[in-house]
Image (spheres, helix red, strand yellow):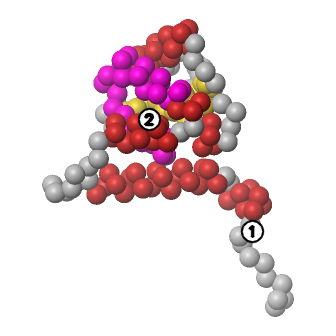
């Protein structure tokens, strides 16, 4: 059967389906790999690690207006309501960790080409309530009531 071999990789939309990841997801994975490499390099005595909060604020500043407004507000809510959470980049997006483990994170709509941004909570978040509870929320804008709910969720998650 010479000459009838096919390649394992395809191109375009078919490639995304075959690989299981979209271009945005692959980019996020690459950003996470860069974050891990940077963290590994920062362990030496001579290496100066960048301030994680500065990195988070810089990433927020790069976002389009709608996402930036949500991320800035969320950052302020986290800092005020759970100062024990440390800002960090996680898959290239703002996240907040306790003892090195991500508790909550923000995903911009722009990056993943979705109609809403997302506030998500990871497994270490203390949000357990019964046998089922939400772990992510769609955000399109923040009302004062939304901000109060988010502040309560952040405090509970950090606790």
Q: Determine if residue 137 is in view.
A: yes
Q: Determine if residue 102 is in view.
A: no
Q: As displayed, is residue 79 above or below residue 30?
A: above
Q: Is residue 107 left or right of residue 42?
A: right
- Are there few (<14), some (14-19), or many (20+) residues within 10 Å of tag 2? many
Q: Which mark is residue 10?
A: 1
* Quarter of the view holding residue 109: top right
Tell me the SS state at disc 1: loop
At x 48%, y 33%, the residue is 105
Residue 120 at x, y percent in the picture: 54, 30
Q: Nearer the viewer, residue 23 or 127?
A: 23
**Residue furthest toward the bottom?**
2
Residue 128 at x, y percent in the picture: 50, 19
Q: Disc 1, disc 2: CB below 8 Å?
A: no
Q: Is residue 58 left or right of residue 143?
A: left
Query: Mark 1 or 2 closer to N-term?
Result: 1
At x 53%, y 39%, the residue is 63
Q: Which residue is mark 2?
A: 95
Considering the image in quadrants, where does the C terminus appear? top left
Q: Is residue 29 magenta?
A: no
Q: Nearer the viewer, residue 75 or 1?
A: 75
Range drawn in magenta: 69-94
């Amino acid at each position: 059967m010479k000459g009838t071999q096919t390649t394992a990789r395809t191109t375009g939309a078919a490639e995304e389906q075959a690989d299981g990841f979209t271009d945005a997801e692959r980019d996020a994975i690459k950003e996470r790999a860069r974050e891990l490499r940077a963290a590994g390099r920062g362990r030496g005595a001579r290496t100066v690690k960048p301030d994680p909060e500065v990195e988070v604020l810089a990433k927020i500043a790069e976002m389009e207006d709608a996402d930036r407004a949500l991320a800035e507000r969320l950052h302020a809510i986290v800092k005020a309501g759970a100062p024990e959470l440390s800002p960090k980049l996680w898959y290239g997006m703002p996240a907040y960790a306790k003892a090195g483990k991500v508790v909550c994170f923000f995903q911009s709509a722009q990056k993943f080409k979705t109609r809403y941004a997302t506030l998500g909570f990871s497994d270490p978040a203390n949000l357990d309530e019964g046998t089922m509870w939400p772990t992510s929320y769609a955000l399109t804008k923040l009302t004062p009531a939304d901000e109060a709910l988010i502040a309560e969720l952040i405090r509970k998650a950090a606790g």
